[in-house]
Amino acid sequence: MLKILSTTLLPSSGSVSLNGIDIVKHPNQMRRVLGYLPQQVPSYPQLTAFEYLEYIASLKGLPKKQVTSQIRGLLERFSLNTTGKRRLKDFSGGMLQRVGIIATLLGDPKVIIVDEPTVGLDPIQRVVLRDVLSELAKNRIVVMSTHIISDVEAVSSNLVMLNHGRLAFQGTTDTLLASAAGKVWEYVVPTNQAPKNLTGISSLVQRSDGVHIRMVADTPPSKTAKEVSPNLEDASLAILEGSMKK
């Protein structure tokens, strides 16, 4: 779906429009305003971060005078301003991910699509990125794909869940949580009785008094199970497993 939205893949059917214009027939309408971060960040290992970003800016057709200060500001915001003449080949995976994020934001795009943007980032940089995306989303379209539920909770106002390419849910976080109300249970079993079948289990934690199990089910899975308020992981599991049964 992200490749279709970013005009790098043609859909087999259907259409996508931006401001009423079909971007399948007119892809440049999207490309002019797009910042796209794929899951695998493309890079040139012999370049420094600054050189690489200057190159990306030139591909976007951005004036050099305009982007130099923007590159410096973004490098500082994502804690890469001290990398100096280090080549990208010497960067860690998390550092390369941050370079990719900066490249996506160059030119102040009005539509931002990011695929698993927090992969490889440390906790501090994940917070920085989530803050940046939240701020940008106030007056831009920001589409983020992720399997990290905490990122969804921190950034997204409208959720779309796909299961094997089909729409399983669309709505707000509150609507998603409400869909799992009365279906989440917690109970404890001895270590040697931990279930082998993990269907419906959203959390399984070993502690001193046994294995603490958090499970999504229509009825209590155990006599000792207590109903608890759902979190986004519980609700997501309920939606995805429910859609697989249909």
Image (spheres, rainbow, N blue to C red):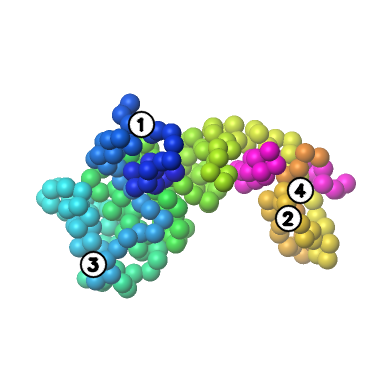
Vertically, is 81 above or below 169?
below
Mark 4–mark 3 CB contact (< 8 Å): no
**Of pointers 3 and 2, the one earlier in the residue sequence:** 3
Question: Please, what is the three-letter code of the amino acid marked with disc 1?
Answer: Ser
Q: Which residue is mark 4?
A: 186
Q: Amino acid at mark 3?
A: Thr
For the residue marked with disc 4, what is the amino acid? Glu
Camera-nearest label, 3 or 1: 1
**Left or right: 196 as drawn, with respect to 130:** right
Q: Is residue 14 magenta?
A: no
Q: Residue at x 34, y 53 (%)?
A: 101
Q: Residue drawn 53% across and 51% down?
A: 147
- Report the Cα–Cα distance between label 3 and label 1: 37 Å
Compared to 41, does 88 lie above or below? below
Query: Is residue 138 in sight in this rendering?
Result: no
As helix, strand or loop, the secondary structure at mark 4 comes to: strand
Tell me the distance, in whole angstroms, between the alpha carbons under discs 4 and 2: 14 Å
| Stretch in magenta | 220-246
Alpha carbon separation for disc pair 4 and 3: 51 Å
Residue 228 painted magenta: yes
In the rendered image, the quadrant that contains the N terminus is: top left
Residue 155: x and y, percent? 46, 42
Front position among marks 4 and 2:
2
Label 3 or label 2, whichever lies nearer to me, is 2
Q: Earlier in the sequence, mark 3 or mark 1?
A: 1
- Foreground: disc 2 or disc 1: 1
Q: Tell me where residue 22 sits by quadrant.
A: top left
Question: Which secondary structure, mark 1?
Answer: strand
Res. 97 mark: none
Q: Residue at 44% x, 62% y: name it.
A: 120
Instruction: Report the disc number at residue 198.
Output: 2
Residue placed under numbered mark 3 in the picture:
48
